[in-house]
Image (spheres, rainbow, N blue to C red):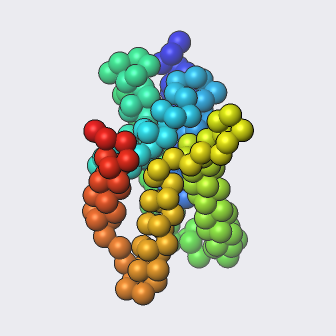
Amino acid sequence: MILLDLFAGFLKVGCFAFGGAYGAIPLIRDVVLSYGWLDEEMLTYMIAVSESTPGPIMANLATYVGSSQAGIPGSLIATLAVVLPSFIIILLITALLKTVLKNPYVQAVLRGLKPCMIGIILATGVFMIFKNGIILQDHILLIRPLILTVVLGVIYFGSRRVKKGGISPILLICLSAAAGIAAYGI
């Protein structure tokens, strides 16, 4: 039964995730939490690990959740389920690409989806920061140490990106790892 749940849950993520991996995080969150496979904190950790390991975030998360719930068969089923819709859609798009992209309605839908995905990604990021970085304990608002690091990093690298036109992802991963080790230890 768990294999069927894994397939159904991650097939839902694969079918309705539009806009890339960050756009899929709210869907993954809903599926994983509704089935009770991970809690909020573990999901946040797994998103960080999935982001820093090679491969797409959705496939990495599906593989981990499937493996933790049903071993190797679970990881295979969950990964297959999350990539199957994209694979089928890409096959169909390549067959129909020239005619579909010229359609003004399709162009309008794609232009309309871009700002929606930006809003979803931003809302998810802000939610995760507030949920995991700001704690209310004994009526006192506590801010975890890395929140300041994240805010300063966004300000610094955001202004740098505007000025120079790009940021090295490898540098960001290394700096994030160093900040995590400095704040929480190994």
Q: Position of residue 127 (x, y in %)?
A: 63, 49
Q: Is residue 135 left or right of residue 46?
A: right
Q: How many labels does the image show?
A: 0
Displayed quadrant of residue 26: top right
Residue visible at 52% across and 19% down in the picture = 4
Name which residue lies at 64% across and 27% down. 34
Is residue 141 in view? yes
Q: Where is residue 83 in the image (x, y as percent from the top left)?
A: 44, 42
Above or below, comparing residue 61 to residue 8 in the picture: below
- Residue found farthest to the top: 1
Q: In which quarter of the image is residue 132?
A: top right
Residue 56 visible in image: no
Left or right, 183 with reference to 29: left
Nearer to us in this view, 64 or 16: 64
Up-down relation of residue 8 to residue 150 (above or below): above
Which residue is the extreme one toward the bottom?
A: 163
- Image x and y of residue 139, in percent: 72, 38
Residue at the spot x=35%, y=18% of the render?
Answer: 71
User: Residue 94 location, x and y as percent?
Assistant: 44, 61
Nearer to the camera, 34 or 41: 41
Residue at 48 percent across and 32 percent down: it is 42
Q: In which quarter of the image is the C terminus?
A: top left
